Amino acid sequence: MPIEDMEEEGLAKIPDLNIAQWIFTLKNNANDGETKTKLMNAIKEQQATPLYDMVCKDLKWSVDSGLVTAMKNSNKESLVKLDAAIADAEENFGESELRDALLKKSEFLAQIGDKDGAVEAVRKTAEKTVGLGNRMDLVFLNIRIGLFFTDHDIIKTNIAKAHQMLEEGGDWDRRNRLKVYEGMYAMSVRDFTLSAKLFLDAISTFTSYELMDYVKFVEYTVWISILALDRSDLHKDVIKGSEILEVLYQCPDVKKYLFSLYNCQYSEFFQELGRVEQILKADRYLAPHYAFYVREMKIKAYAQLLESYRSLTLSYMADAFGVTEEYMDTELCRFIASGRLHAKIDKVGGIVVTNRPDSKNGQYQTCIKQGDILLNRVQKLSRVINI
């Protein structure tokens, strides 16, 4: 996918997910004047009365009654025109024109933030839609509505519906589009393994500009893949991925984050991880998971360093990560105690000794345990048969 603007290949940005991000930003920073101005301009431009009501409630804004009255009147006029167009299409035109009129109403309701009205209008439009491709586009519209309002039921139901439609047929563009939509949802519910797989599959065929731009998509892909993939897969799919590397020249911070971990430059990696943490905190999809993400990335970095040695000093590890010995000791104790790192700390000698699990011995113990369970079941069964 070339970097130049190819947004005309995407579907309409209805609803505009940037607005949902602005609302999230203002929830965390009510004094962000620039974001507030952009949000209010978008609401006024689209005459989005239901959205304005929701924003005032969520952000505890005082309601501008004059603005609400003007927007409601505008909405009524628009709906009267749209309903008239639908009635005219039913009486004087064919199924195709009726479907187009219904779609315009669906998109209008989605744009002004009327979630329930939009979903119902999409359902009515789908009843009049024959082509599989057009029906799938309606499913994508529903998923975007779900993403905008963070409605998991709408998203899951329509992703399942899209998969059923793809079994009937479906062109490659919509197959690839569904991967991005499903990957976005998987990322938002912390299924990073599935998200990384779907994003990487779609990286060379991305056209879903209605969700985000291509640079943002690549950033998500890199952040998620670093955590979800092992070192060999990360090298094959990301480090050597030409489409990703092309974009990373525009994103030096993301590139530094990726290569600092891969090249074992742990001190630099920790600094970049701190920067990524702040970005994730401000992202509406990843904010609920930023603490989990940072913890797992720390574990991954510690484990990567420990794998290279049978033992190493605590001071060496602290220097490698650019932190104090006390901090490193606390971190390692926490992760070792929870079973996430296989090592022991010799506090007297100030040495960390790796304690790699013996997979063969583990398999033997599992086999013995399962064998005991099986024998117990056979004995119980024999007693029942004898009786």
Image (cartoon, grey):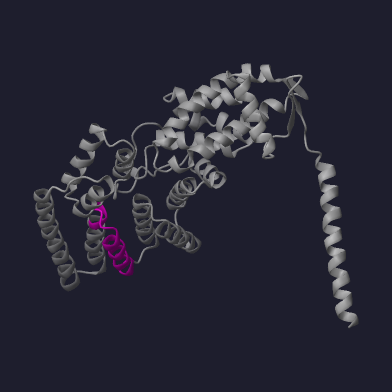
Q: Quadrant of the N terminus?
A: top left
Q: Residue furthest bottom?
A: 387
Residue 4 placement (x, y as % from top left): 36, 31
Magenta region, residue range: 109-129
Which residue is painted at 29% across and 58% down in the image?
Answer: 115
Q: Is residue 328 left or right of residue 221?
A: right
Q: Is residue 61 above or below residue 245?
A: below
Residue 282 placement (x, y as % from top left): 39, 36
Is 105 included in the stretch rendered in magenta?
no
Q: Is residue 339 visible?
A: yes
Question: Which secondary structure type mostly characterizes the magenta part of the structure?
Answer: helix
Which residue is painted at 20% across and 51% down in the image?
Answer: 48
Based on the displayed image, in which of its 4 quarters is residue 99 positioned?
A: bottom left
Q: Is residue 232 visible?
A: no
Based on the displayed image, in which of its 4 quarters is residue 10 positioned?
A: top left
Residue 8 placement (x, y as % from top left): 31, 42
Q: Residue furthest front?
A: 348
